[in-house]
Amino acid sequence: MRCSCCQKELINNVTLRELFFSSSQRCYHCEKLFSKIDQATACPGCGRPNSAELCSDCRLWQQQLGFVMKNYSLFRYDDGFRQWIEPYKFTGDYRLRGAFVLELNRALQNYRSYLFCPLPLSKERFEKRGFNQVCGCLDLTKFSYELLLRRSELVPQSEKSREDRLRMEQPFQINGPIEKIRNQKVLLIDDVYTTGRTLFHGAELLYEKGAETVKSLTFAR
């Protein structure tokens, strides 16, 4: 057995805790990278940890757009999560994509009636990186997904300030016939929820084209 994150062999050094109590298939070191969010105390709008009431950001989105995202995030975006996402997303260590496939499968089970739509990269960004980091993770789950959106090339989100992210223009267009979207429930899937602007752009466009419901799931918040 290998760790689903670092791919190191677990057979010879598996601990009793990993053998009997862990459902993640991660080694002890990698397990410490991921801090799960307690959904009972997370914001019902954006999934922010320790904010059981609708947070101030979500109240502002609701005031501006008339809806909240109802985002579900698996883990906290902290130093541990950054130790996973930086070599995976920015260095291209594709072996890391299975780090939390069990938790991702379990979360997606709750959205069986939804179309799963990973947020796309622009053509230029995809060619530079070589893969979509969200699709890479989803490809290891038992669920299929639809590329309902396509994206224009803009400055990468990781290079923007919070203020610049919030002012971002609509980057998406519908990919394919709108009949595929009309009256459907859609789950947008992304790696990190920061300000929510990118997800809200996707949701706004899908609602405009006739989607019944749009929610989101992110790997971290």
Image (tube, grey):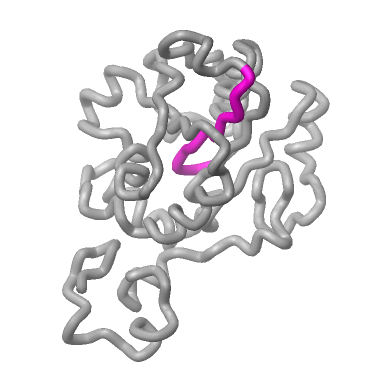
Q: Per the image, is 184 magenta?
A: yes
Q: Position of residue 62 (x, y in %)?
A: 79, 29
- Is residue 150 placed above or below 72 in the rendered structure? above
Which quadrant of the view contains residue 166? top right
Q: Horizontally, is 220 left or right of 156 in the view?
A: right
Q: Position of residue 94 (x, y in %)?
A: 22, 47
- Is residue 25 placed above or below 17 in the rendered structure? above
Count the numbered circles shown. 0
Q: Position of residue 148 (x, y in %)?
A: 45, 21
The residue that appears at 25% across and 34% down in the rendered structure is 131
Q: Position of residue 68 (x, y in %)?
A: 73, 33
Predominant secondary structure in magenta? strand
Q: Nearer the viewer, residue 89 or 1?
A: 1
Q: Horizontally, is 172 left or right of 152 in the view?
A: right
Q: Per the image, is 112 magenta?
A: no
Q: Which residues are magenta?
A: 183-193
